[in-house]
Amino acid sequence: MKRNQKKIESSIVIALTDVCETLKEKYTGFLWLTHFVDYANFPQSLKLVFVFDTKISLENAMNDDLFKTIFVLTESRLKRESVTVKRIDKAVYFDTEEMGADVDNMKWCRKYS
């Protein structure tokens, strides 16, 4: 990884850690998030995956308009770290542990790469 890529990665991690902690405090069922990126095609390749415990929790989040909150919060935290994503709604994905979300499972990770 090149020096500038390491700097961008660090900025992404700082922003997403803040987003994750905020969401875990406020929303029951939200567990964690992760990101995938191909720096040869950054920022278009950035994918952010927000993981809930169950499908019901995810559906409740949809009904509570949590998705809009996630878009706004994530975009603002990334901008604070000087990371700009043109269409945050195209970078964000949702999944659940109930449906197999597991960052240590290469099969699961491949569906976002």
Image: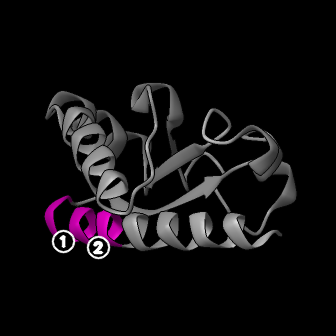
Name the dominant secondary structure of the magenta segment. helix
What is the x, y in percent for residue 47?
Answer: 60, 42
Of the numbered discs in the image, which one, if any, rests on residue 25? 1
- State the extent of the magenta-drawn residues as a range: 18-27
Locate the C terminus by quadrant: top right
Tell me the crowding category of disc 1: few under 14, some 14 to 19, or many 20 or more residues within 10 angstroms, Cα based.
few
**Circle 1: element type:** helix
Locate the N terminus by quadrant: bottom right
What is the x, y in percent for residue 76?
Answer: 25, 49
Q: Residue at x 43, y 50 (%)?
A: 54
* Depth order, front residue of 39/103: 39
Residue at which label 2 appears: 21
Tell me the crowding category of disc 2: few under 14, some 14 to 19, or many 20 or more residues within 10 angstroms, Cα based.
few
What is the x, y in percent for residue 71?
Answer: 30, 38
* Depth order, front residue of 90/9: 9
- Name which residue type carries label 2: Glu
What is the x, y in percent for residue 16?
Answer: 41, 64
Using the numbered discs, state the Cα–Cα distance from disc 1 to disc 2 in whole angstroms.
6 Å
* Depth order, front residue of 63/20: 20
**Circle 2: element type:** helix
Q: Is residue 15 left or right of residue 97?
A: left
Q: Is residue 19 magenta?
A: yes
CB under 8 Å between discs 1 and 2: yes
- Name which residue type carries label 1: Glu
Q: Quadrant location of residue 97? A: bottom right
In this rendering, the label closer to the viewer, 1 or 2: 2
Can you say whether 95 is above or below 8 in the image? above
Q: Residue at x 70, y 64 (%)?
A: 5
Q: Is residue 59 left or right of residue 106?
A: left
Residue at the extreme front: 4
Q: Residue at x 55, y 51 (%)?
A: 98
